[in-house]
Image (tube, grey):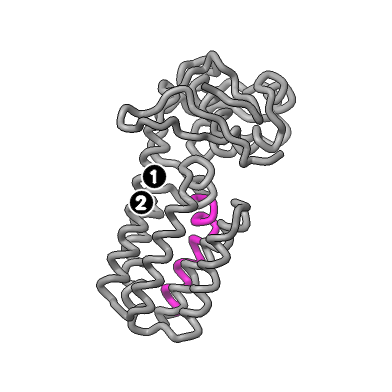
Amino acid sequence: MNLSDSQTGGSVPAASSIPRRVSAMEAVLTYLRQAIEEGEYAVGEKLPSEAELCRRLEVSRPVLREALRALQTMGLTASRTGKGTFVISSGPVEDPTFGDYTASDLLEVRRHVELPVAGYAAVRRSAEDLDQLAHLLERMERETDTTAWVAMDTLFHLTIAQAARNPVFRKVIEEIRDALARQSAFLNELGDRREQANREHRAIVEALSDGSEPDAVAAMAHHLQRVETTLSTIVRRGPETDDRTARPKEGGQQE
C-alpha cells in the first residue's frame, strides 16, 4: 500500500480557502476517532477486527494499522495481545503519548535542552559537523519515504548535540530518541510537516555555519514552536470538521 495516496477532507477551517489534502490513513483515523468520541464504540468495547474494518472502510491492512497506532498514541485505545483493540477513552484527546513520554513532557525537556545545545553548537561545531549536517539536509530534502526521513530527523538532532561537545546533551537526546522518532512520524503523517521541517532544519544549520549563537537558539526555538503548534492543531482537529457519510477509501477522492 502506498501511503502517499491522498484524499481531500470534507471541509476545512474557515481561515483556509484550499482544501487540505489528507492521507488514506488520516481519513481512517478521523472516521474511527469520531466513532469513538460520539459513542459508537463505547469505553471498554472492543473494536471490530482488522479484517472487518478493512472490509468496511475499503482500505488495506497497513493503512488501518497506522490509523490504529495513531488512536493509541492519542490515548483513545489500547491493544491487548491476542484479544484485539479496546476503547479506553472517549476523548477529547489532550496529550498524545510517544513511547514512554507524553508530547508535553517531550516539548518541555526539548526547550530546556535543545535551545542551549543549538547555542553551544554554533560556537563549538567543527567543519566535519557542518559537513555531516549539510549532507543530512540534502538527503532529507530528497527523501520521500516517511520512515527513512524520520530516521534522518532524529540523527539530525543527535548530530547537533554532538556538535555542542558535551556528552551529557547527547545522552539526553539518545534517551528520548525513540519518542522523538514516534512523534516525528506522527507529525508527518497527520500534520504534513516534512517540507516545513526541512526549511526549519536548514535555518538551524545556516545559523550554525555562521557561528551565531543567538541565531541558532532562535532557529531552534522556532522549530520547536512549530512542532508544538502542529501537535496542538492535530489534537484540536476534531472529527466534527469531517463528513463521515463518506467512508474513507484508498486511491479515491473524498469531497
How would you rate the neighbour count of disc 1 (Cα within 10 Å): few for under 14, some for 14-19, many for 20 or more? Answer: some
Residue at x 68% of width, y 28% of height: 59
Q: Quadrant of the N terminus?
A: top right
Name the foreground residue: 215 vs 6. 6
Residue 175 falls within the magenta-colored stretch: yes
Can residue 78 be seen here? no
Q: Quadrant of residue 215?
A: bottom left
Q: Quadrant of residue 197?
A: bottom left
Secondary structure state at the residue bearing disc 2? helix
Q: Position of residue 13 (x, y in %)?
A: 35, 29
Q: Position of residue 68 (x, y in %)?
A: 60, 34
Label 2, label 1: how far apart the Cα atoms are: 6 Å
Q: Quadrant of residue 121?
A: bottom left
Residue at x 52% of width, y 61% of height: 153
Using the image, tell me which numbered label, if any, was put on residue 226: 2
- Figure check: 191 above or below 169: above
Name the foreground residue: 157 vs 86. 157
What's the amino acid at mark 2?
A: Arg
Q: Are marks 2 and 1 in contact (CB under 8 Å)?
A: yes
Secondary structure state at the residue bearing disc 1? helix
| Residue on which disc 1 sits | 230
How would you rate the neighbour count of disc 2 (Cα within 10 Å): few for under 14, some for 14-19, many for 20 or more? Answer: some
Name the foreground residue: 254 vs 225. 254
Residue 64 falls within the magenta-colored stretch: no
- Figure check: 107 above or below 95: below
Residue at x 58% of width, y 28% of height: 28
Chief secondary structure of the magenta portion: helix
Q: Position of residue 228 (x, y in %)?
A: 36, 48
- Figure check: 205 above or below 147: below
- Residue range highlighted in magenta: 167-183
What's the amino acid at mark 1?
A: Thr
